[in-house]
Image (cartoon, helix red, strand yellow):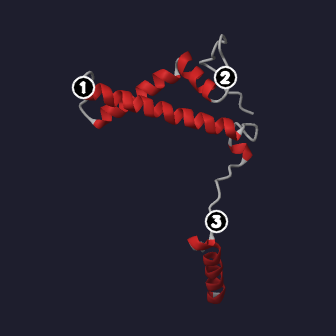
Amino acid sequence: MENETNNNHHHQNELMRLAPAAETEMLPAQLHAGASPFKLMVDPVMRQRLREALFKLIDHHDESLAAYVAEHKLSLDSYKEYIELFARSLRETMDSEDGVRYLLKAAGFDTEGEKVNLQPVWRWK
């Protein structure tokens, strides 16, 4: 009985042993298609453009807030307040037609003259 317990423990250790970093190859994380509402239909180039546009937008908001503080146009009591204002600024931009239109244009879509849907419906399957 004790030998059987030791064998099970040894077997569990073998299953849980991690490969040293040198033996592993870094691969991008692969998500299960069912875990994402996009599945495999979203163009990776479009997603990259969207990410880049979001990073530029974040940088712009950060630089603008920092400039307002440096020019004494905005006073802050803490970093927490800065982050709260930063989040508010991003939220207000993304809740506007101009903000969504900026992302659409950056991703390669021409929406000139079209109405932008600020309340799209989630259509989960």
Q: Position of residue 46 (x, y in %)?
A: 67, 35
Q: Position of residue 30 (x, y in %)?
A: 68, 52
| Quadrant including the N terminus | bottom right
Question: At 62% from the left edge and 24% from the top edge, which residue is drawn?
Answer: 105
Which residue is labeled 3 in the image? 25
Residues packed near mark 2 inside 10 Å, few (<14), some (14 to 19) or many (20 plus): few
Question: At 36% from the left edge and 34% from the top edge, which residue is drawn?
Answer: 83
Mark 3: secondary structure: loop
Q: Nearer the viewer, residue 29 or 48?
A: 48
Residues packed near mark 1 inside 10 Å, few (<14), some (14 to 19) or many (20 plus): few
Measure the C-alpha gap from mark 3 to mark 2.
40 Å
What label sits on residue 75 in the rendered view?
1
Return the disc, 3 or 2, that comes first in the chain's sequence: 3
Mark 2: secondary structure: loop
Q: Which amino acid type is shown beneath numbered disc 3?
A: Glu
Question: At 63% from the left edge and 75% from the top edge, which residue is drawn?
Answer: 12
